[in-house]
Image (tube, rainbow, N blue to C red):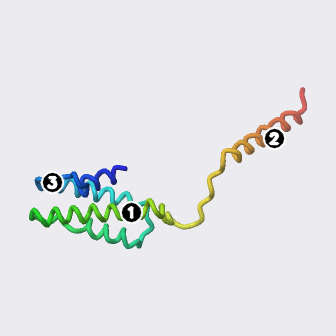
Amino acid sequence: MAASETVTLVLGEDSPLPENAADVEYLVRLLRGHIAQLGARTAPGIPDLQRAQRLCSDSIPEDYVPSRVYLVRLAEATQELMAYVERDGPGQISTGGGRRRPRPTLNMLRVAVFALALACLVFAASVPRT
């Protein structure tokens, strides 16, 4: 949601261009952060991600027009990456190998607790009273 708002600040029809270099740097910093977050939810090697990361690694141009052009290109790359994540969802991101076990459902947990309680009851009933 925040990425969408930042992109709208830059690309929106009613949004004016930033007036000074500090505003450009602030928006670039926000967009780079959004790209990093979206990149974590994307499988590596996606062309949209590679393009966005290439733009992030570039420095902000010094002159007025080139810095605004860079800002717009970065916002467009962020928008494309957001569309990819929304369309295809998070990719297969391996975290270190091996298969991940599926999370137990609530019913499986209930069955396990019931079985444990039943086992305790049977054990308690089998212990001789003195």
Residue at label 3?
18
Compared to residue 2, the image places residue 117 above or below, namely above
Mark nearest the camera among 3 and 1 is 3
Q: Is the residue 79 above or below the residue 22 in the image?
A: below
- Residue 36 image position (x, y, % from top left): 34, 60
Mark 1: which amino acid? Gly
Give the mark nearest the N terminus, 1 or 2. Answer: 1
Q: Is residue 103 left or right of 60 when viewed as pictured?
A: right
The percent coordinates of residue 72 (x first, y second) are 23, 62
Residue at 42% from the left image edge and 70% from the top image edge: 44
CA distance for labels 1 and 2: 48 Å
Tell me the crowding category of disc 1: few under 14, some 14 to 19, or many 20 or more residues within 10 angstroms, Cα based: many
Q: Furthest residue to the front?
A: 13
Image depth: mark 2 or mark 3 in front = 3
Q: Position of residue 84 (x, y in %)?
A: 42, 64
Q: Is residue 84 left or right of residue 98?
A: left
Residue at 31% x, 67% y: name it: 52
Q: Could you tell me how far apart the alpha carbons at marks 3 and 1 are, in whole angstroms? A: 26 Å
Cα–Cα span, label 2 and label 3 = 69 Å
Local SS, label 2? helix
Question: Amino acid under label 3?
Answer: Pro
Badge 2 amino acid: Ala
Seen at 90% across and 32% down, the residue is: 128
Q: According to the image, label 2 marks what residue?
A: 119
Residue 121: image tag: none
Considering depth in this image, is 101 or 86 the residue closer to the camera?
Answer: 86
Q: Earlier in the sequence, mark 3 or mark 1?
A: 3
* Residue count near mark 3 (Cα–Cα under 10 Å), binned few <14, some 14–19, many ≥20: some
Asked whether disc 1 touches disc 2, contact meaning CB atoms under 8 Å apart, the reply is: no
Classify residue 28 by image quadrant: bottom left
Nearer the N terminus, badge 2 or badge 3?
3
Residue placed under numbered mark 1 in the picture = 39
